Image (cartoon, rainbow, N blue to C red):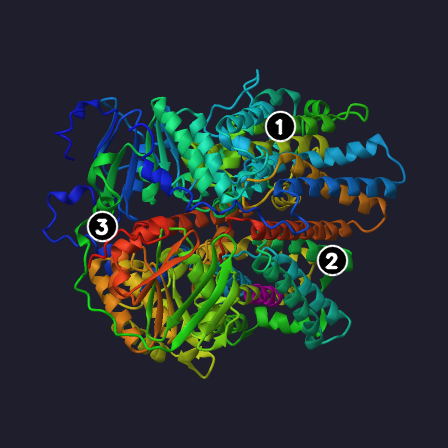
């Protein structure tokens, strides 16, 4: 009863000669983990574009920095939510609709400083609720996130058109002055830093781990007692909330009036920022900091094109190249990694 | 039903009927019939309240409006059946339309325009298809990127300007998209031709079978000797060609072109496929469903115009329509039987 | 089931009583009972699909039973989720591993909770890494960086992390579900040392293993599962290796009445020389004759499936493959099909069938080219005729060939897969455990078909996890052990006992009498 039987002892030593084989490490990526590569790419890209931007303009000014940051803040915010969703292996196309709806509400309801107390929280809550509806539908009906958020984008942008049929409206000056900063105190920079801090904190909470776990492997997440459904609902709700926050900043600082279709470009741009930022559409891997760098890269391209005197249309072309280049690069990295993965089983 | 009837049910309740008795053919056709039924119902109901709605002229204009969507939706149908998505539709439509009218303005003929447009479409399709099939990059991002890129190039080339009417080529496509021979609409005849080729191609050719097989189960398809890469690439090339044709038709229909002319089709081309009963997970769907989906969308547009309701309601209705059709589909599929054997 | 005589009947600390669980029509557990005591190692043995894994999954909270009660210390508990089970002190090393591939090793250690936290309640990553390293050091695990993503580790190391993760939570009941299957021997011994230590500290340990030797090395008590029930249970000293094998096989031991296939011709059809595929299998050489049914046996994961996949161009491999005197360079299934090879895969749902396509479409997919009219269109008449002929010759029971293949019963789906493979008239058939989960009637039909095909000169490589089948169907059986062919049994040596023996030990024990 105490230890193993002596016969078994004798038998030992016959079977065990399989060495733990390490992966063949020949490829150029071999020394890097996917995490490192997807972290390095957006950083390198950001630095290169930053240098190009400064050299094209000929000098570095803090107002340039402010412009870049301010124009990027809405995309950073929407991209934050999109990152969370994509980390769970989902996608949120409805951010465009929620953004438009929020823009319409802000431009029609928050026109004087007195409106702010009620309507700012309300707009944020509406965004949160709209996102939560997405999440609930995805979890309960098991429809694909793509379809659910495509349809709800349509509905939300219809609601935006109801609230504000054409471009127009105005925004309370108090909101504008609260959010826009001077060149000396770039509030946009503070905001960006806040986002980074929020991410770093989030990453270290149980919820942060749950997001990555759900995206990494839903089955394994369940075996680790991770609340999969709840995590998904919260993530979509947050995505809606961040779209509303983005709209708030957008109207208050950038446009000063509303547009019922303001959100539409943000659908594709937010996905693009996330992808350039190195977050995998297959879920489980990526970071918000990459998304912020991706968003900044996209708007720096516009700045570079502007300063170089070329037609502004060039920026769309270059952005397209950038997105395609990034997604193909990451795809190749994935392929190489999968190939050298010692446990990979061959598939189609 | 399953809960309530234990006590008073007849002895031989055919409990297993739903799974084993149901014809597979019927299951596959149900979503498509559902889409057609919805479309016809909508049409009939509106016609009752608004007799002008079923006039020859109005029917023709409904067909004119939906035909272009139907053509673009053909490519999207194939891509979605094959487990993909094509977001580069708007850019390709813009390129085709603008190139066509530009050629026309400088006195060129249709052929000269097509010689430029078709290779562009093929290259776009190849880039999309190879990235997805060979590098296994996510289709959403790849096609989103190529859309941005091609549209950007088009904007650079045209400086964002469109062009009004473009000579002979545009005239031809104007006839194709809005003309009528007697009480027959030309677009209807063109569409019928496209539909015939599409439906026969999907159901009765090797390629069509391969598209379904790859969409249904790429591993099983590969093990059955199907070249998955070739099938997927072909599907994206066809989609780009359909978008090109759609763009040229739209140029004729609108009688003017501009780079962003296809932007609406990003959403609607996907919507008609989903309303037509295809699953975004691939493997199911049929072009007949897409036709019904396209007709439904333009009837819906007509109805809202009659009711004097703006685009806001149209968008909301589009969304609701997708929710209900897809939701119903998922529900039916789930009731269709447990996933485990 | 029959513990009334046990003097310690009242002293059980964990009891899983009358558990039932079925998945659709497949019964995984039919009234099984399992009891355990703290401070004991309890080995669960049985063939694949005997129910031992399902039982463990129920206890661990990852599977909900249809019926049955779980008692811990005499009180009924519910383990509706892994988390609840964990809170009751039940920790499980899952067979399929529960590691999150994209998270770091350190994060994985604390996904379920227990991460070191800083003042603000946030995970202290440095501390988590240190804790992880400390746990590894205590357990004697070397060379695993807590920072590296779990998915990038070789399988054996992942297994170690999984083990460390569970043990670090100090479970009162530890379940090791095939925890040793991917481990090299020295790691198995390491694990056993730890398990003994835990046992001596009062932990109840369930050990599921296919390797008999491991049970004898470690267990205090053994329960043998068969056909979803606990067939035999008792202290270790009541068992011998022979009696265990007997209990696992049940009364089916001995020759069955199956008709034997006709003798093969001496002509060699397939020659394989030194075929290897990474860690999956290595240095495999074999000959298959024309008209021969050549069996492949062994525990799960010894390389049988990858070997067949490699012969179908589905898994990259290196080595020599010669078919009918022609050397093959197999890079894709298409090439294999053209060379006259067909494979029936293991998993109908993920590999074999396009479930939402019709039976006909599935049957004719590999041979569409033959049913064309005018070279472009599929001729419905010819296609239907071909599909109907195939379906009839395999007696597929279906309302209509237009029905979705998913509407068929498992056995009939299996026949459709067979039909696909046969449709092209292959010279060499590769069967990957195709009779698993198939009812007896269909099995008999499949066997009759195999005999007929062999009689017609087709060669069949037949991997089965069922030793009885192999004995009755095959001319020769190669047993794989340690990722290579350990021995080839034929003639009088081809017995169930020898197959099981060679599967668990890599050799046929000289002491075992040939009983047939």
Pointer 3 with pointer 1, Cβ within 8 A: no
**Residue C294 location, quadrant:** bottom left
Q: Which residue is mark 1?
A: A200
State which region is magenta: B234-245
**Neighbour class for label 3 at 10 Å: few (<14), some, many (≥20)?**
many
User: Residue B118 in magenta?
Assistant: no
Front tag of 3 and 2: 3
| Frontmost residue, C99 versus C420 | C99
Where, quadrant-wise, is the C terminus of chain C in this rendering? bottom left
Q: Nearer the viewer, mark 2 or mark 1?
A: 1
Mark 1 element type: helix
Q: Quadrant of residue B89?
A: bottom right
> Is B301 placed left or right of C503 in the picture?
right
Task: Name the residue carrying label 3.
Answer: C249
Chain letter for mark 3, please.
Answer: C
| Vertical order, C283 against A234 (above or below) | below
Mark 3 element type: helix
Q: Nearer the viewer, residue C142 or B91?
A: C142
Q: Which residue is mark 2?
A: B153
Q: Is residue C162 visible?
A: yes
Which structural element holds mark 2? helix
């Amino acid at each position: 009863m105490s230890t193993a039987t002596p016969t078994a002892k004798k038998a030992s030593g016959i079977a065990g000669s399989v060495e733990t084989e390490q992966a063949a490490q020949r490829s150029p990526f071999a020394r890097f983990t996917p995490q490192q590569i997807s972290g390095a790419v957006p950083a390198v890209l950001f630095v290169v574009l930053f240098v190009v931007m400064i050299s094209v303009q000929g000098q570095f000014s803090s107002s340039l920095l402010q412009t870049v940051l301010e124009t990027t803040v809405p995309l950073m915010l929407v991209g934050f939510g999109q990152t969370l969703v994509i980390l769970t292996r989902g996608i949120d196309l409805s951010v465009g609709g929620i953004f438009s709806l929020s823009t319409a509400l802000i431009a029609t309801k928050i026109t004087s400083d007195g409106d702010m107390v009620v309507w700012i929280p309300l707009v944020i809550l509406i965004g949160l609720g709209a996102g939560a509806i997405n999440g609930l539908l995805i979890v309960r009906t098991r429809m694909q996130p793509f379809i659910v958020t495509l349809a709800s984008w349509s509905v939300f942008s219809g609601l935006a058109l109801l609230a504000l049929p054409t471009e127009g409206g105005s925004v309370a000056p108090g909101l504008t002055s609260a959010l826009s900063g001077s060149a000396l105190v770039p509030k946009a920079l503070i905001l960006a830093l806040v986002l980074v801090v929020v991410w770093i904190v989030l990453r270290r909470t149980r919820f942060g781990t749950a997001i990555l776990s759900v995206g990494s492997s839903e089955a394994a997440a369940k075996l680790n007692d991770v609340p999969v459904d709840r995590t998904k609902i919260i993530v979509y709700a947050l995505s809606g909330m961040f779209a509303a926050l983005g709209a708030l900043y957008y109207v208050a600082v950038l446009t000063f009036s509303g547009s019922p279709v303001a959100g539409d470009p943000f659908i594709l741009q937010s996905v693009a920022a996330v992808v350039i930022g190195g977050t995998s559409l297959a879920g489980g891997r990526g970071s918000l900091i990459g998304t912020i760098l991706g968003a900044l890269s996209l708007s720096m391209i516009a700045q570079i094109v502007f300063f170089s005197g070329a037609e502004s249309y060039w920026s769309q072309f270059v952005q397209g190249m950038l997105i395609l280049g990034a997604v193909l690069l990451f795809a190749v990295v994935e392929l190489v990694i999968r190939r050298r993965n010692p446990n990979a089983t061959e598939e189609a | 039903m399953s809960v309530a009837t234990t006590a008073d049910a007849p002895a031989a309740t055919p409990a297993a009927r739903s799974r084993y008795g149901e014809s597979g053919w019927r299951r596959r056709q149900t979503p498509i019939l559902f889409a057609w039924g919805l479309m016809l119902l909508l049409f009939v109901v509106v016609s009752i309240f608004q007799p002008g709605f079923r006039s020859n002229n109005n029917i023709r204009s409904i067909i004119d409006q939906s035909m272009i969507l139907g053509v673009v939706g053909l490519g999207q149908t194939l891509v979605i059946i094959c487990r993909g998505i094509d977001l580069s539709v708007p850019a390709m439509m813009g390129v085709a339309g603008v190139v066509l009218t530009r050629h026309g303005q400088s006195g060129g003929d249709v052929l000269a325009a097509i010689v430029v447009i078709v290779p562009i479409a093929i290259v776009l399709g190849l880039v999309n298809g190879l990235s997805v099939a060979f590098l296994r990059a996510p289709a959403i991002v790849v096609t989103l990127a190529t859309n941005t890129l091609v549209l950007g190039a088009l904007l650079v080339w045209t400086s964002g300007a469109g062009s009004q009417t473009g000579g002979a080529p545009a005239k031809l496509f104007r006839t194709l998209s809005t003309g009528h021979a007697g009480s027959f609409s030309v677009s209807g005849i063109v569409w019928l031709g496209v539909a015939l080729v599409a439906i026969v191609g999907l159901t009765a050719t090797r390629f069509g079978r391969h598209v379904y097989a790859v969409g249904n189960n790429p591993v099983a398809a590969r093990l059955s000797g199907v070249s998955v890469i070739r099938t997927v690439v072909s599907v994206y090339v066809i989609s780009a060609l359909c978008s090109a044709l759609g763009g040229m038709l739209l140029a004729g229909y609108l009688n003017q072109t501009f780079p962003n002319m296809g932007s609406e089709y990003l959403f609607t081309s996907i919507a008609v496929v989903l309303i037509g009963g295809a699953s975004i997970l691939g493997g199911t769907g049929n072009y007949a469903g897409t036709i019904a989906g396209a007709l439904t969308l333009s009837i819906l547009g007509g109805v809202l115009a009659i009711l004097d309701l703006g685009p806001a309601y149209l968008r909301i209705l589009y969304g609701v329509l997708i929710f209900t059709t897809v939701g119903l589909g998922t529900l039916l599929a789930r009731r269709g039987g447990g996933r485990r054997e | 089931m029959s513990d009334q005589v046990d003097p310690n009947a009242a002293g059980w600390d964990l009891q899983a009583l009358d558990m039932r669980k079925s998945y659709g029509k497949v019964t995984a557990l039919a009234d099984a009972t399992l009891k355990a005591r703290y401070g004991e190692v309890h080995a669960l043995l049985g063939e694949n699909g005997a129910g031992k894994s399902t039982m463990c999954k129920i206890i661990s909270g990852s599977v909900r039973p249809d019926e049955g009660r779980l008692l811990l210390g005499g009180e009924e508990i519910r383990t509706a989720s892994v988390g609840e089970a964990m809170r009751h002190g039940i920790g499980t090393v899952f067979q399929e591993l529960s590691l999150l591939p994209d998270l770091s090793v350190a994060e994985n250690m604390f996904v379920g909770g227990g991460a070191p936290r800083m003042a603000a309640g946030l995970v202290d990553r440095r501390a988590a890494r240190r804790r992880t390293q400390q746990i590894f050091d205590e357990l004697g695990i070397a060379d695993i960086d807590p920072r590296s993503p779990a998915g990038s580790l070789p399988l054996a190391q992942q297994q170690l992390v999984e083990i460390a993760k569970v043990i670090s939570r100090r479970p009162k009941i530890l379940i090791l579900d095939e925890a040793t299957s991917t481990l090299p021997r020295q790691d198995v011994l390491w694990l056993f040392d730890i398990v003994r230590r835990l046992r001596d500290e009062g932990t109840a340990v369930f050990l599921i293993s296919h390797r008999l030797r491991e049970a004898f090395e470690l267990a205090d008590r053994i329960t043998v599962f068969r056909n979803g029930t606990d067939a035999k249970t008792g202290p270790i000293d009541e068992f011998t290796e022979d009696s265990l094998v007997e209990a696992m096989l049940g009364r089916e031991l001995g020759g069955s009445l199956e008709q034997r296939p006709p003798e093969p011709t001496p002509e060699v059809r397939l020659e394989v020389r030194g075929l290897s595929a990474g860690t999956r299998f290595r240095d495999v050489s074999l000959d298959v004759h024309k008209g021969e049914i050549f069996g492949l046996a062994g525990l799960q994961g010894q390389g049988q499936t990858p070997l067949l996949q490699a012969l179908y161009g589905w898994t990259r491999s290196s080595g020599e493959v010669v078919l009918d005197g022609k050397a093959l360079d197999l890079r894709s299934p298409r090439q294999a099909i053209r060379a006259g090879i067909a494979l029936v895969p293991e998993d109908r749902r993920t590999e074999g069938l396009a479930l939402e396509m019709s039976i006909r479409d599935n049957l004719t997919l590999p041979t569409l080219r033959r049913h064309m009219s005018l070279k472009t269109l599929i001729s419905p008449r010819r296609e239907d005729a071909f599909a109907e002929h195939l379906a009839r010759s395999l007696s597929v029971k279906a309302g209509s060939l237009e029905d979705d293949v998913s509407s068929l019963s498992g056995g009939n789906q299996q026949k459709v897969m067979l039909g696909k493979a046969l449709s092209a008239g292959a010279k060499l058939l590769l069967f990957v455990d195709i009779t698993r989960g198939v009812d007896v009637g269909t099995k008999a039909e499949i066997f009759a078909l195999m005999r007929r095909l062999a009689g017609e000169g087709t060669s069949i490589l037949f991997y089965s996890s069922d030793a009885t089948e192999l004995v009755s169907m095959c001319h020769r059986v190669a047993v794989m052990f340690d990722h290579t062919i350990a021995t080839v049994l034929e003639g009088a040596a081809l017995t169930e006992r020898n197959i099981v023996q060679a599967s668990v030990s890599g050799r046929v024990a000289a002491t075992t009498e040939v009983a047939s």
